[in-house]
Image: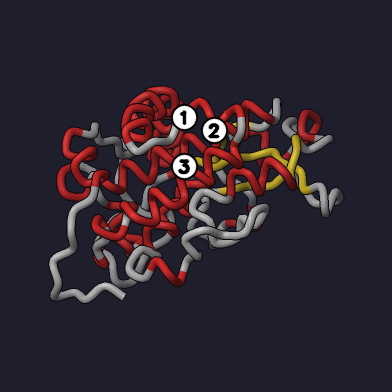
Amino acid sequence: MFGFGRKKAEGRLTALLADYPAWAPPHLGHVLKLPDSPGPVLSPEQARANFEAYRDAVPVRIAALRPVLAALGCDVDQAYADAAAFVRCLHPVLLAELPPLYRADLAKRDAWELSPRSGDVIVLSFMADLAMLTGDVLIRANPGIFWGMDLDPRDRTKFARCRPSLIGLGDRLFPNLPPQVFFLEEEWFGYYANMDDPARLALPEPPAGQWFGVIGGILPERLERYHTHPDLERLRGEGWLVKAA
């Protein structure tokens, strides 16, 4: 584990993010009140505005991400053409490049949800952009799934509630389940939060076909296991999915 008193050597990503454009939702706040946070709770209108801004920002943010990943040796186009190969490139790169950017205060939820994600916390914009790329690849591969707000009543007490999420995948292993809701941004911030002790996350070279513990492994794993839910088109006209997008 990295010692808090030691200065960590800067890597390539640290330099590449020096001029990286920041992006944060227009309204900063929580969807659930955190007892130890001074941050406000978003109103339904603010949550909707955040979702619409997020959805519109996806292509712009992927364009910003492209040259940074290229400088690290990973091609964004490969994510669409061969997600497994892309992640096998990305995993060791980020396993080496993220630890120097780790800060314990940024690994907390209030930092993710209240930060402008700019300046000395620009890594949070970078992680959020990786979530956008993941969702865009899945959407291209599974026609009909979409970015939407998690308005599922079962999630009213979860931190994904009203957040921009990927909606509509069906689980090949459990076909009777309803369309899945994936809060991808939280998952990518979870990778960052493990960078205080990267060895806890994964081996430097995980076995072929193993995606658990691989940075970005949610992408090929979901391409392999999930597909567009067969009843998605009908279900989008019912219940909470009507207002999700």
Residue 79 disc label: 2
Answer left or right for 193 relative to 214.
left
Distance between mark 1 and mark 3 Cα atoms: 13 Å
Position of residue 95 relative to residue 143, above or below, is below
Give residue 193's position: percent from left, percent from top.
37, 63
Distance between mark 1 and mark 2 Cα atoms: 5 Å
- Residue visible at 81% across and 47% down? 172
Q: Quadrant of the N terminus?
A: bottom left
Give residue 77's position: percent from left, percent from top.
51, 25
* Amino acid, disc 3: Ala
Residue 131 disc label: 3
Q: Residues within 10 Å of mark 3 (few under 14, many from 20)?
A: many
> Considering only order in the chain, which callout, 3 or 1, is on the residue closer to the N terminus?
1
> Considering only order in the chain, which callout, 3 or 2, is on the residue closer to the N terminus?
2
For the residues carrying marks 2 and 3, which lies nearer the camera in this image?
A: 2
Residue 181 disc label: none
Answer left or right for 162 relative to 155.
left
Relative depth, front residue between 64 and 99:
99
Relative depth, front residue between 72 and 36:
72
Residue 238 is drawn in which quadrant? top right
Q: Are marks 1 and 3 in contact (CB under 8 Å)?
A: no
Q: Secondary structure at mark 2?
A: helix
* Amino acid, disc 2: Ala
* Amino acid, disc 1: Val
Q: Are marks 1 and 2 in contact (CB under 8 Å)?
A: yes
Give residue 15's position: percent from left, percent from top.
19, 42
Q: Residues within 10 Å of mark 2 (few under 14, many from 20)?
A: many
Q: Are marks 2 and 3 in contact (CB under 8 Å)?
A: no
